[in-house]
Image: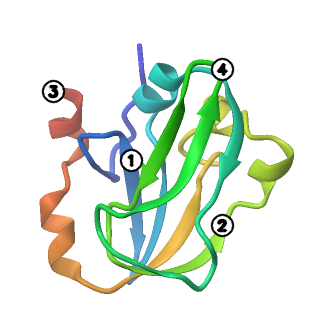
């Protein structure tokens, strides 16, 4: 059974967000990584780039498909998980901790209201 971590916010597409003040850490949910299959390459967003909610900011490649990474929030990319460059499979083995994708400085707190709670995400 796929894990849905409590305390995070989710998009219908399977991106999760963990908030710390205005800093948002994003990654792929356990369900999303399972659907994608074994991740073999991650194209992270560019650090310093201004991004808009629902904008394509990177890509994840697996043996099954290449999937765009869609930003769940507007803001500026603060950092990316460089460990994914060496070991992209961290997105599969540790989607909620070691396999995070990027940190974003959130611009619009209202966008959080458009996201799903863990309970809501379980039921879609």
Give whichever of 57, 35 is nearer the camera.
57
Provide residue 4's location: percent of width, then percent of height.
Answer: 37, 33
Q: Give the Cα separation between the discs numbered 3 and 4.
A: 28 Å
Q: Of marks 1 and 4, which one's residue comes earlier in the chain?
A: 1
Eye-nearest disc, 2 or 4: 4
Residue tagged 4:
63
Q: Give the Cα separation between the discs numbered 1 and 4.
A: 20 Å
Answer with left or right where residue 54 lies relative to residue 44.
Answer: left
Eye-nearest disc, 3 or 1: 1
Crowdedness of circle 2 by 10 Å Cα count: few (<14), some, many (20+)?
some
Residue tagged 2:
80
Crowdedness of circle 1 by 10 Å Cα count: few (<14), some, many (20+)?
many
Asked if marks 1 and 4 touch (Cβ < 8 Å), the reply is no
Which residue is painted at 31% across and 86% down in the image?
107
Q: Give the Cα separation between the discs numbered 1 and 2.
A: 15 Å
* Above/below status of 52 relative to 38: below
Q: Of marks 3 and 1, which one's residue comes earlier in the chain?
A: 1
Q: Give the Cα separation between the discs numbered 2 and 4.
A: 23 Å
- Determine if residue 98 is in view: no
Eye-nearest disc, 1 or 4: 4
Give the quadrant of residue 6: top left
Residue tagged 3:
123
């Amino acid at each position: 059974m796929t894990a849905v971590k409590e305390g995070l916010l989710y998009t219908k597409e399977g991106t999760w967000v963990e908030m710390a003040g205005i800093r948002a850490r994003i990654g792929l949910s356990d369900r999303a990584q399972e659907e994608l299959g074994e991740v073999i390459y991650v194209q992270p967003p560019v650090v310093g780039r201004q991004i808009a909610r629902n904008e394509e900011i990177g890509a994840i490649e697996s043996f099954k498909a290449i999937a765009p990474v869609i930003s769940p929030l507007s803001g500026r990319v603060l950092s990316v998980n460089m460990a994914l460059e060496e070991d992209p499979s961290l997105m599969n083995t540790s989607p909620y901790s070691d396999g995070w994708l990027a940190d974003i400085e959130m611009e619009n707190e209202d966008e959080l209201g458009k996201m799903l709670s863990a309970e809501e995400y379980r039921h879609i």
